[in-house]
Image (cartoon, helix red, strand yellow):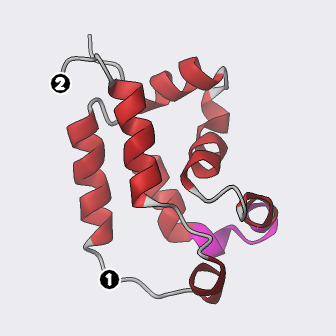
Amino acid sequence: MKTDMLSLVCERFKCSPESFEQVIFRHSVSPLVWPMVRFTLRFRRDVYEFDLELIEDLKKATSFSEVSQIISNYCSVPRRRRVMKLLFQARVSKRRLKNLARELFAGKPE
């Protein structure tokens, strides 16, 4: 049976499925900007709409290659640049997401 990213994240970080979004966000942004991101997510989720859609799509991924494909699809879609993301680099990092997925799916069959 294949395991999806949601269950792997919940198992690894001992979190509920409802916390998936926050756990992924925290591990995929710079630790320096995480407090600002967390605050902004609480009051202005629309600022991170694109990133939240990406994280939602990652829930069902069952392999590292699937995660890579989802990330590539999102990166190829043109989007408006938000001031906060440009100035503070407060956005989901492709590299951090892929590194996390690589760790989670290590040793799991494709």
For image coordinates 53% across by 59% down, the residue present is 52
Residue 78's mark? 1
x and y percentages locating residue 48 in the rendered image: 59, 69
The amino acid at mark 1 is Pro
Q: Is residue 66 above or below residue 50?
A: above
**Residue 12 placement (x, y as % from top left):** 56, 21
Label 2 SS = loop
Return the residue at label 2: 110
Query: Is residue 56 positioned above or below 89 on the image?
Result: above
The quarter of the picture where the C terminus appears is top left
> Can residue 74 be seen at all in this image of the molecule?
yes
Q: Upstream in the sequence, badge 2 or badge 1?
A: 1
User: The magenta stretch spans which residues?
Assistant: 40-48
Residue 41 lies within the magenta run: yes
Q: Residue furthest front?
A: 32
Q: Point out which mark residue 49 bears.
A: none
